Structures are given as structure tokens and as C-alpha cells.
């Protein structure tokens, strides 16, 4: 179940529709949802589980449509953000998310390179990312 609620999709639609700020609080809630076994460490395997939740047709890869359709259905105001995030995940730009992309993305979040994404690393990464993407999700929000 947690796999279906990864990252920005982890939050109740009402929260998302209003505001992602403060970003560190949003990042904290995402971490809790993404850390499937609740041990305070986000692992490479847990990242796989998360994206498996988007693989609607079960072919082992996640297309843009598979990734964005949940957002479009539940939080249409975050349509632009979900596309911007897909662009970030799709690091080799081949229009499919697969192992290569997950390896890259995990390595970026794992700032100290020890193979585990601690909550601190996760929160710092996502707080900065939401800040840098404010132009695609910050319409009308304040503070
Ligand atoms: C988020 O940042 C604020 C301001 O620095 C801080 O008071 C708060 O405890 C932080 N929340 C989390 C979950 O880290």
C-alpha cells in the first residue's frame, strides 16, 4: 500500500491542493510514507517498492502516463509538478523510469554515499527541490 503513496502523492489531496509549505514538513511526511518498514532509513529496495506502485501494467518500467495519472486524478493542481518530477527521475531521458534511473536518483539523495538515505538527507534534498520547483507548484501560495 505504501508504494502507491510515494513522494508528493503521500499526502491527502486537500493538503496538496493548498500548499506544500513548509517544504521540510512535507518532506518529513513523504519520508514516513516512503520508509516502508518504518526503521528510519530509506533504502534502495524501498525506492524500488515505491516506483513499483506506479507500474500499472507491471512491465517493470514506469511511463510518464503511469506516473502522472494518479496526480492528475487526485490532485490536478499539481499536474505541472508531477511532470517536472518525472523529468528529474528520468535521468537518461528515455521516457521510461527503470533501474538505471532509480540508481541515479537514489545516489543523489544519498548525499554521504553510504547506501542509506537517512531522514536528514531526504529532507534536505526534498526541501531544496520543492524550493527550486516553486515556479511549477507555488501559484498563489504565500510565505
Ligand atoms: C522545519 O523547519 C522549521 C524551521 O526551521 C523547524 O522549526 C521545524 O522543526 C522543521 N520541521 C521538521 C519536520 O524538520
Image: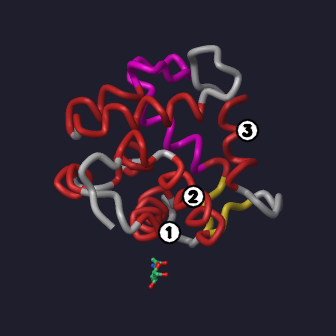
Q: What kind of colouring is applied to the model shown?
A: secondary structure
Report helix, strand or loop for mark 3. helix
Q: Is residue 26 left or right of residue 121?
A: left
User: Which of marks 3 and 2 precedes in the sequence?
Assistant: 3
Q: Which residue does the numbered mark 2 point to in the structure image?
A: 128
Residue bounds of the magenta highlight: 46-66
Which one is in front in this view, the residue at disc 2 or the one at disc 1? 2
Q: Residues within 10 Å of mark 2 (few under 14, many from 20)?
A: some
The quadrant of the image that shows the C terminus is bottom left
Quadrant hosting residue 15? bottom left
Q: Which residue does the numbered mark 3 point to in the structure image?
A: 104
Q: Is residue 71 left or right of residue 123?
A: left
Task: Inspect the magenta stretch and tell me whether residue 53 lies in it.
Answer: yes
Residue at 58%, 40% in the rendered image: 48
Q: CA distance from mark 1 to mark 3?
A: 23 Å
Which one is in front in this view, the residue at disc 1 or the one at disc 3? 3
Amino acid at each position: 500500500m505504501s508504494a502507491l503513496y510515494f513522494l508528493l502523492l503521500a499526502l491527502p489531496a486537500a493538503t496538496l491542493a493548498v500548499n506544500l509549505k513548509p517544504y521540510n514538513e512535507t518532506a518529513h511526511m513523504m519520508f514516513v510514507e516512503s520508509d516502508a518498514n518504518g526503521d528510519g532509513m530509506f533504502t534502495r529496495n524501498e525506492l524500488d517498492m515505491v516506483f513499483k506502485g506506479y507500474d500499472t501494467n507491471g512491465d517493470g518500467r514506469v511511463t510518464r502516463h503511469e506516473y502522472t495519472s494518479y496526480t492528475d486524478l487526485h490532485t490536478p493542481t499539481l499536474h505541472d509538478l508531477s511532470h517536472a518530477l518525472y523529468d528529474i527521475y528520468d535521468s537518461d531521458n528515455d521516457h521510461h523510469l527503470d533501474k538505471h534511473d532509480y540508481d541515479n536518483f537514489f545516489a543523489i539523495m544519498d548525499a554521504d554515499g553510504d547506501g542509506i538515505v537517512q531522514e536528514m538527507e531526504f529532507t534536505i534534498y526534498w526541501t531544496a527541490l520543492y524550493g527550486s520547483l516553486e515556479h511549477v507548484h507555488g501559484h498563489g501560495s504565500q510565505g
